[in-house]
Image: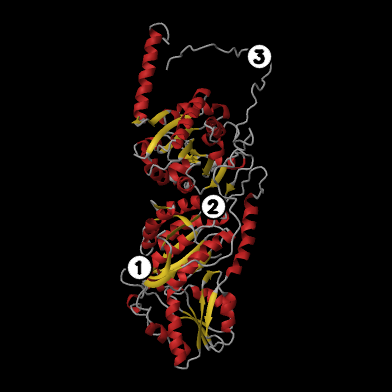
Amino acid sequence: MSTIPLGPVIDTSRAPASGARVVEPQLPQLLFTNTHHLCPGCGEPLAIRSLAEALEDLGLVHTAICALGIGCYTSFGGTVDVEIVQALHGRAPSLATGIKRMRPDATVFTLQGDGDMVNEGLQEVLHTAARGESVTCVLLNNGVFGETGGHMTATSVIGQRTKNTIDGRDAAYHGYPILIGDLIARLEGAAYVARGSVHNAGSVARTKKMLRRAFETQRNRAGFSFVEILTMCPTGWFIPTGEGPDYLSSTLGEVHLMGELKADGVIRTTEELHAENVRKAAELDAQLARGGIED
Amino acid sequence: MTTATPTRALMEGSEALVRAAILADCKFFAGYPMTPFTEVLEHFAALLPDVGGVCINAESELEAVGMAWGAVATGERAATGSTGQGIALMQESFSEATLAELPLVIFNMSRSQGDYFQATRGGGHGDYRHLVLAPQDVREGVRLVQLAFHLADKWRNPVMLYGDYLLAHTQEAVTVEKVDLPPLPPKDWGVDGTTSGTGRSRTVTSLGVAKPGARPFGQEGKAQYIATKMAYLEREVRSESGYCDDAETVIVAFGSPAKFVKYAIAQLRDEGLRVGYVRPITLWPFPTEAVHAAAQGARVVGSFEISSGQMVDDVRIAVAGAAPVEFIGGVSSDHSGFGLGRLLDVDEVRERIRALHEGRPQPPVPGYEEFAYEPLPHQLAATPEVTP
């Protein structure tokens, strides 16, 4: 891909004139603390903060109920100021169903990892979507069982090294990754399906927008909503902490592409998103070849 | 309201149990069809919407129990149910729900009494118990269903109703009326979303994770807390005894078969035989003291069960050597495997009790010996010692 000159460039070759300072001290209303108990470089805190902010933006703070899965993110049960019903591994969507049917005015969402949702509880999320339950399922996808120490999940990409695919995931031996968003988007009951990421500021902003649209879908009782968020796991990927975001965008992010897979009744498959990205990149290349980017 | 049936009416056991659940204010049910439990699901599906409740035909037993878990967590009364294999699938949730202190009610319409261990020994992970109520007939079932919801809320603990094919499918003339039970404290722990963002948001969890200001259990603390709670649940033990004061032979039996045993014992009493019975109404906690007391003057204690002998273990623990304990039941089902078979016949039951009383060997269980296992020669050879 070509290098694209964009906007003002911050000079990082020398120290800034003044030290870093908090411009706007912010703690979302649904968080008890800005700290977390997870590894350095983990993407899950970013995802959870985005989720808390999205609920706050929509004025849904005092309606939120989370059916919480089992994974590293389970520790947020102690740091988010959200009503929580702790689920067994894989079972959060059925809990969310029972909660929502009894408390239809609440904003009910699940928080699950790829091991929880796509391995252990795949049928739960699919059936909940198919029933068109008015709940939001949120998937934190890092393509690895982080909590057990870095093992293959159903979303690990081909070639990904994990503790039980030590030479990389081999399709012939370990099978292919599941693109869960595509499965869900095809179901009639699913109204909004999107795949975001937290590997850079732009993707965080985009993901927050997706979360807002998902919760709006639930508020409008339009059907099932789903947001997958790709998160960094440098510990489980066995890479230096700082390389997490780049690794994410170049491995997981190349397979589980960011974008809206279903919105306003239109389904766009991951293949279509990929074709769109290729087309856009070619267009940019052509513009650069012509001497610059047209706005 | 169509669900209250104050007058005596002929109805299927399943329907009576469901109407009793609705009288107890059950608002949610989720289940997956499986004989002989299926009709419980059917009646909930038909009756719950009339009272503003919800019944979901879940995609599996795993999801059925999960949905009920979510509904219970809101503070509403909710239940699930199944039989045998389906209950086995749910048991991970039963144990975890016990740790989460969820008042979940479970309708177990079993295929025989061979699920006694499954019901009373758990089957889920960890150190947990749940109350198990075993009605002998539809009339008692109507009352025990309401007690199940009451006890579940009283202790914030799962309660299982252990029925069978006969209970679920027999048409009986019953009056489904409300049982008077004392009021319970409001469920201020139930989630509704309103405490989110207030600094004191509610949590319903099986784990030791705690929010600021909440009791910081930790995993070990939570396990200790539940273990000490279980001891209090043993107070809810219930049983019925008959003719035990002078009984030389005491029979222990539960559920539908206990009704046959009671009838056979009344006949044997008329013949002058000093026989009596103890009927556990709670399978857990097991009525250890009642069985032990009945065994004090007895020559022999028999356990009659439609299985290869499971409750007999609890009977032996309860009798604690006061008298010999013998198993006088057997495996017996109908040809489909779902119902209760030829052993459940007053003549059969009476002759088995008489044989025990007179010190004779038990008559053969109908259809039992025909299919007895025949070991292969290599299986009869002794297996060598391998411990160093």
| Chain bearing mark 3 | A
Cβ atoms under marks 2 and 3 closer than 8 Å: no
| Structural distance between the alpha carbons of marks 2 and 1 | 35 Å
What numbered label is drawn on residue B75? Answer: 2
Pointer 2 and pointer 3 on the same chain: no
Characterize the local packing of mark 3: few (<14), some (14-19) or many (20 or more) Cα atoms within 10 angstroms.
few
| Structural distance between the alpha carbons of marks 2 and 3 | 56 Å
- Please name the residue that numbered disc 1 is placed on: B338
Pointer 3 and pointer 1 on the same chain: no
What numbered label is drawn on residue A16? Answer: 3
* Quadrant of the snapshot with the N terminus of chain A: top left
Give the residue type that dot 2 points to.
Gly
| Structural distance between the alpha carbons of marks 3 and 1 | 78 Å
Mark closest to the chain's N terminus, 2 or 1: 2
Residue B345, percent from left and from top: 37, 80
Residue A66, percent from left and from top: 53, 42
